[in-house]
Amino acid sequence: MRDHAAVRRGLAILSTALITAGLVLLVDVGITLAWKEPVSSLYGKLKQQQAEDDLADLQQSFPGPGKLTGLTGPDVRRARALSQRFAKQIHTGQGIGRMKIPAIGLDIVMVQGTDTSSLQRGPGHYPDTPLPGGQGTVGVAGHRTTYLAPFRHIDDLQKGDTIDIQMPYGNFRYSVDEAKVVDDADVGIVRKVGHDQVVLTACHPLYSAAKRYAVFARLTQIGLKREGAGRG
C-alpha cells in the first residue's frame, strides 16, 4: 500500500511539473507571437548598448580634424569618399550608424557584419556592399523574432515610407520603392542598379528561414557632416 501511495504521489508531482512546464511554454510562445522572443531580446538589449557605445566613439573621432576641408564638389561625390574612408576604420560587430524607420517605430544602432554574433547586436550591414553614401546598393539584414527583432514589422512598410540612416559622416534618407519575397540564396537583390539604394532583408515567413523578405528603398537625400561638428 505504501508503495502504491508513493507511486501516486510521484505521478501527481510529475503531472504538476509537466502542466507547469506546459503553461510556461505556452506563455513564452504567446509572448513571442505577440512581440518577440523574451530571453534573446534581453541579451540583444545588452549587446545593442555595446553597439551604442561603439557608435558614440566613432561619432567623436570620425572623420577627424581637417579631414573634410579637402573634400570638394557635390555632396554625392564627397559622400563616396567619406564612406570609403570610413569603411577602412570599422570592424565586424562594431556599431557604425543609426537606423530610423518611423513607419514601424524603429530607432536602433546598425552594426557591421551579418554573422551570427553581429546580428545579435542589431541590424547588420552586408560587408560586401557599400556603406551609405557609397555607390550602389547598401544591404542590411535583421532578425524578426529574436535579439530585439528589429525587422519584426518589415512587411508593414509601404511605398513612400522613409528610412533614415545616420552615419558619423552624414545622414542618408531613403524612400521605399517596393518589397518582395525572394529565395534565401538570392544574392542578386544587392546588385547595383541605376540608382543608389538600400535593401533591408529578413527571414520570411516568421519563425522560418525558407525565404527572405526584401524591402528596396531609393536614396533621396544626403546631409553630410560639416567640419567642426561634434557628436551627431
Image (cartoon, rainbow, N blue to C red):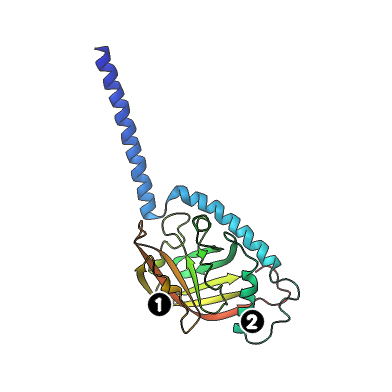
Earlier in the chain: of badge 1 and badge 2, it is 2
Q: Quadrant of the C terminus?
A: bottom right
Residue at position x 60%, y 79% in the image: 80
Q: Position of residue 122 (x, y in %)?
A: 52, 59
Q: Is residue 92 above or below residue 15?
A: below
In the visual, does 68 lie left or right of 147?
right
**Circle on res. 99:** none
Residue 173 visible here: yes
**Viewer-side residue, 40 vs 190:** 190
Going by the numbered disc 2, the residue's amino acid type is: Arg
Residue at numbered disc 1: 159
Residue at position x 64%, y 81% in the image: 78
**Viewer-side residue, 107 vs 10:** 10
Which secondary structure, mark 2? helix
Q: Residue furthest top?
A: 1
Q: Is residue 10 above or below residue 140?
A: above
**Viewer-side residue, 210 vs 12:** 210
Residue at numbered disc 2: 78
Residue at position x 38%, y 50% in the image: 31
Q: Quadrant of the N terminus?
A: top left
